[in-house]
Structures are given as structure tokens and as C-alpha cells.
Image (tube, rainbow, N blue to C red):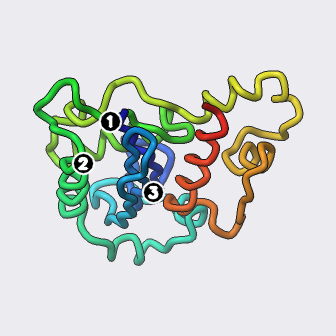
């Protein structure tokens, strides 16, 4: 089984109006991590940048705009995927795994492919994804009322995963937490 754990940092909350400035994750095949990745990427210059979103990820507008252009990072990302998946084989794809990825990250990633004129998102990824938020909800169904919210930080702490608040909202750290939580939920 091929899993692509991933997390994004974005320039806002709308996958149509805002872009990606960080893509991090790891590739796991049959329970073994094969490779980790962390790409900083200049957001699509035609999209908006929210100052509030940059504050959350502790980045400046100048910093994110100085990252490598999205077409360059898209090519590097595709080359990474191609090391593990044959996009021409309909039976060889990744499951996308993230925290709240069904309602947030997946749409940003799919739109990012489109912005890079890449129509082959579905050649790399199964349409059904693994959302660790949903898995954790199922695992903690009877205990949900004990949690003040269901943010990644809160849920990780609740199940005994140590969290460094100063590292939150960096996609590479958030994906470590997400994978740890995933392993506790399966």
C-alpha cells in the first residue's frame, strides 16, 4: 500500500483564491517510510495572499515570494512521485493522507496541479483519501466531549503525542504529528 502523507501551508483559506507556499510530507510504502520531502514554493502570483495566513505560518510576504516558482516545484514534486508510482498504470497510485485533508489540503493540491496545467492529478492519487481527522474522530468518539476542540495539536496531546507549539503550522512538523496520530488510530 502506497501512502503519501502530506500537509500544506497556504496563503489563505480558499483553495480558489489562495495558493500554496509549503508542501511537506513523506512517502510510505507497505509500512516503511521511503522518503520525506519539504518544498517551499512561491504561491501562484495571480492569487491572493492573506496577512493572517502568513502570521499563522510565521512567514512574510517577501519570504514566500522569494521561494522557487511553482512550476519548478511542481516538476520536482512530480519527479518525486514518479519514483514510486507509474502514472500510466491505473492500479498504481498513492492514497493521500493528512489531517483535515478531505475538506482543505486536497482541494489546494488539486487546484495547484491545475494551475500548473497538469491534468493528471488522478493518475497519481486514488480519489478516496485517508483523513486522520476522521480516523481520530472514530477512535475518540466516546471521548470527544473531553476535548476543547479537535485541532491537530489538541488531539495529539490527548492521545499522548508530545507537541512543540513553537513548531506548529510548519507543514513538515505538522505531518510528523499527523503520521504519529495516524499510527495511533489504525
- Residue 52 visible in image: no
Disc 3 from disc 1: Cα separation: 26 Å
Answer whether labels 1 and 2 touch (C-beta < 8 Å): yes
- Give the SS element for disc 2: helix
Disc 1, SS = loop
In front of the other: 130 or 62: 130
Residue that numbered label 1 is attached to: 94
Q: Earlier in the sequence, mark 3 or mark 2?
A: 3
User: Marks 1 and 2, Cα distance to the nearest angstrom?
Assistant: 9 Å
Residue 86 image offset from top left, x and y in percent: 15, 38
Residue placed under numbered mark 2 in the picture: 81
* Residue 11 numbered mark, or none: 3
Tell me where residue 143 appears, x and y as whole percent: 84, 28
Residue 164 shown left or right of residue 131 in the figure = right
Picture coordinates of residue 154 (x, y %)? 76, 47
Q: Name the front one of labels 3 and 2.
A: 2
Task: Give the vertical position of 6 relative to 149 (above or below).
Answer: below
- Among the two numbered marks 1 and 2 on one chain, the one whose residue lies closer to the N terminus: 2
Residue at 60%, 62% (x, y): give it. 56
In the image, farthest residue toward the right? 146
Amino acid at each position: 500500500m502506497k501512502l503519501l502523507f502530506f500537509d500544506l501551508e497556504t496563503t489563505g483559506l480558499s483553495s480558489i483564491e489562495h495558493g500554496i507556499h509549503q508542501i511537506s510530507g513523506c512517502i510510505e510504502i507497505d509500512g516503511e517510510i521511503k522518503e520525506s520531502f519539504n518544498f517551499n514554493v512561491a504561491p501562484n502570483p495571480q492569487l491572493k495572499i492573506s496577512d493572517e495566513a502568513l502570521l499563522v505560518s510565521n512567514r512574510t510576504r517577501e519570504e514566500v515570494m522569494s521561494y522557487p516558482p511553482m512550476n519548478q516545484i511542481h516538476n520536482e514534486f512530480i519527479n518525486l512521485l514518479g519514483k514510486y508510482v507509474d502514472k500510466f498504470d491505473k492500479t498504481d497510485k498513492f492514497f493521500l493522507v493528512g489531517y483535515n485533508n478531505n475538506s482543505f489540503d486536497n482541494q489546494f493540491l488539486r487546484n495547484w496541479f491545475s494551475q500548473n496545467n497538469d491534468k493528471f492529478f488522478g493518475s497519481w492519487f486514488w480519489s478516496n483519501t485517508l483523513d486522520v481527522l476522521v480516523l481520530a474522530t472514530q477512535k475518540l468518539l466516546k471521548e470527544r466531549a473531553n476535548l476543547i476542540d479537535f485541532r491537530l495539536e489538541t488531539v495529539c496531546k490527548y492521545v499522548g503525542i508530545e507537541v512543540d507549539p513553537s513548531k506548529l503550522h510548519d507543514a513538515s512538523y505538522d505531518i510528523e504529528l499527523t503520521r504519529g496520530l495516524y499510527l495511533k488510530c489504525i
